[in-house]
Amino acid sequence: MDILMERGRIISVSECDSSANTSREPALKFDNAIVFPGLINSHDHLDFNSFPQLGNRIYNNYVEWGLNIHQKNKDVINNVLKIPGQLRTQWGIYKNLLNGITTVVNHGPKLVVEDDLITIMQNSHVLHSVANEKKWRLKLNMPFIKKEPFSIHVGEGTDESAQEEITALLKWNLFNRELIGIHAVAMDEEQAGKFKAIVWCPDSNNFLLGRTAQIDKLKHQTKILFGTDSTVSANWNLWSHLRTAKDTKMVTDEEVFEMLTGAPAKVWGLSSSSAITIGHNADIVIAKKKPELKGMDAFFTLNPEDILVVMHKGCIRLFDEELCQQFFEQGINVEGFFKIYINNKCKYIFGNLPELIKSIRKHYPEAHFPITY
């Protein structure tokens, strides 16, 4: 396929034609590659991605987990929190970018983000959870508030209390606010029908609770979105999460792909960022294709090191070193890019990520990163 872009938008998608590009604009060519829209991560805590995974056993619910790690892992928590929030947030943004995510929904207090490496969505009323959000009933039912959905951790557990909090949330939703439930491990089909959407985070669920939501049932009642959660409870590698989702046999490959593109675009109001279509934002990911794989298998076997290019609104944010010659020949400006390695694969990323890592390690020398430089 040929994909043409102008001013951050896709202006043409057509069958390959070597004579099509008659202008002097740069044109990159890829062999043995696949292309897909920049992915939408519907749940992350951007400032919590400097934590290692914290958990000492399988828990009945998130409250039990929180109490346990604050007792058993207190020193690690305190050390990570010495890192200034802005630095932790910036690394959280890079974590998503390295995975081919061009839009991420942050859950928590609204963050001040100084650049636009990727799109940070903060257009919902955020409640942490029934157990951990003070005055949640009042906040949910405040009159004259902006018409935005409420996103909340709910049903994050396998015991009776986890389901009871879903019942309590629905009972106290006096004005029928639009609800986006995160995790929903304890949720049943009837409850699911009362939510605008559910965000599925299988990797986090399995790590903390030993099981995940009944997505094969819930998907018939509401929209299902996909979330990574932060590294405090999940692997940094999105692609590992997607294979976990696939292995549940509760969803088709196409349904998982929709959870990362079309479905969240509708729910979060991102209609111009969900497909490689004329008029849409040029949020595009190009990745190495294993020659023997076809269709969705080529997508699900990817890892961050296989990504060749990430574009956000037409701006290249990451590229593989194999493109350096083409960049040179096409006169593409690489000022502001820095060299990094992911599993020994060389990439160039926009922004001084090595310096960010050094700054974080000044506050927390034990901080681990999945890249070298």
Image (cartoon, helix red, strand yellow):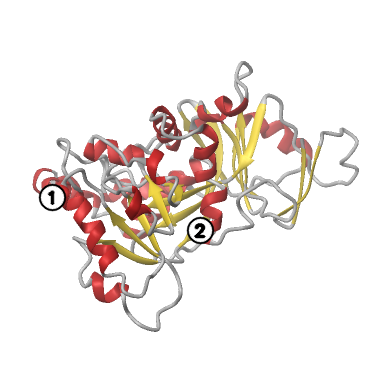
Q: How far apart are the two marked residues, 2 and 1, measured between alpha carbons?
A: 34 Å
Relative image position of residue 108 (x, y in whole percent): 34, 62
Amino acid type, residue under disc 1 in the picture = His
**Looking at the rendered structure, which numbered label has been put on residue 70?**
1
Relative image position of residue 107 (x, y in whole percent): 36, 58
Above or below for 126 versus 66 = below
Q: In screen coordinates, is 340 left or right of 288?
A: left
Who's the residue at 45% across and 27% down the image? 343
Give the structural element (helix, strand or loop) at label 2: helix
| Along the line of sight, the residue nearer the viewer: 6 or 187 | 187
Who's the residue at 20% across and 69% down the image? 134
Considering the image in quadrants, where does the C terminus appear?
top left
Using a 10 Å C-alpha cutoff, classify the residue at mark 1 as few (fewer than 14 neighbours), some (14 to 19) or many (20 or more).
some
Of callouts 2 and 1, the N-terminal one: 1
Q: In screen coordinates, is 309 left or right of 256?
A: right
Considering the image in quadrants, where does the N terminus appear?
top right
Q: In which quarter of the image is residue 206?
A: top left
Who's the residue at 56% across and 30% down the image? 299
Amino acid type, residue under disc 2 in the picture = Val
Residue placed furthest toward the front: 190
Whether residue 87 is visible: no
Count of numbered marks: 2
**Looking at the rendered structure, which numbered label has been put on residue 267?**
2
Relative image position of residue 31 (x, y in whole percent): 71, 26
**Looking at the rendered structure, which numbered label has been put on residue 44?**
none
